[in-house]
Amino acid sequence: MKRSLFTILFLLFASSFAFSQVYMRSNQAAQKPPKIIDTTVMQVVYKVQSIIDSLSPDRVSQDNMILQIGKNRTSKFFTDTRVRDSIMQANISRMSAAASSGGRTIVNVQANMNMPGGSTGSGDQSIVHKNWPKGNVTVTDRVMMDVYVYAEPANAFQWQILTETDTLLSYACQKAVATFRGRDYEAWFAPDIPINEGPWKFCGLPGLILKVSDTRGHFVFECISLEQNPTQIEYADLDYLKTNRRNLARIKRKFHEDPMAAMEGMRASAPTGSNVRVMARNADGSSIDENEMRNRMRNRAYNPIELDY
């Protein structure tokens, strides 16, 4: 039997000890086509800044995230990963080619892509579907090789609308405040865009939410563009593990606090005949011992957006 060597090279940056996740299964079935759940009437792009490690507030991750709003008021909120995904797919193709030829490849994969301005992406892979099924919020997420799904009733935020006003993207906006699952939020909504929507799970104001942040500045969502090109809203039809919100938060916390244990699990479950090696390097190319890498990653405080788990 041909023996293939897969090496996953993790780059650790000064701003974030994050790493990529490569998903490979032997005999993996062809992915089913996605379900079409609606057609957009508007697509909104938000710049999202977040602090993944609450003990290091100077390390700010930045993503562009997309809110698709459907004509049936279904919505989908997800990270724009097109650049990262194209690089990941190229690397996975190289790994697959090496596996079929019995060759060796060293793959340098980086999940936290450098973003404009020197910040890094959060690596967030959660997708929030609101009003799908009707009246519910459905969230999908991925932790290593497992994909999860949970559904919950749509939560009515208890907003208090204030008299303060501001202008964002040339729209007159009004301020509202609310407390939700352990955080206090300030939001700015545009009454001239009469859509009861916003980023992530935010909704319930008489106008599109153009900016919202928690009062500690750990999560900031700010609209940077509005588009009205109709496109389909898709729901990936995968073999999800059904769970609930709190259980998924605990799974993610465990992974966050000891990701090397998850890496070792991936190595143990690698296909027969393959040898998966985990390598770590600093930004200058110098190697890092696995124990040192484990200690570095453990010294991070888990900082989820929802604190009530």
Image: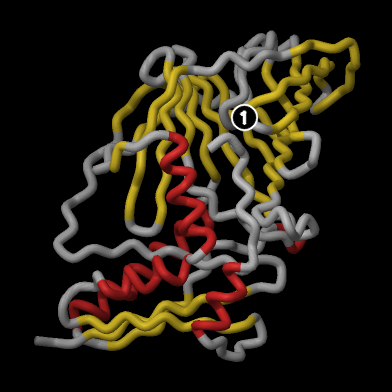
Q: Position of residue 293 (x, y in %)?
A: 55, 78
Placement of 191 over or under 170, stated as above or below: above
Protein image colouring: secondary structure
228 or 136, nearer to the observer? 136
Displayed quadrant of residue 39: top left
Q: Position of residue 264 (x, y in %)?
A: 36, 73
Q: Which residue is mark 1?
A: 181
Q: Is residue 249 left or right of residue 180?
A: left
Write the residue at 39% across / 27% down: 151
Mark 1 crowdedness (10 Å alpha carbons): few <14, some 14-19, many ≥20? few
Placement of 45 over or under 36, stated as above or below: below
Placement of 295 over or under 222, stated as above or below: below
**The residue positioned farthest toward the bottom in the image shown:** 286
Write the residue at 26% across / 80% down: 98
Q: Is residue 262 left or right of residue 79?
A: left
Q: Amino acid at mark 1?
A: Arg
Write the residue at 16% across / 77% down: 272
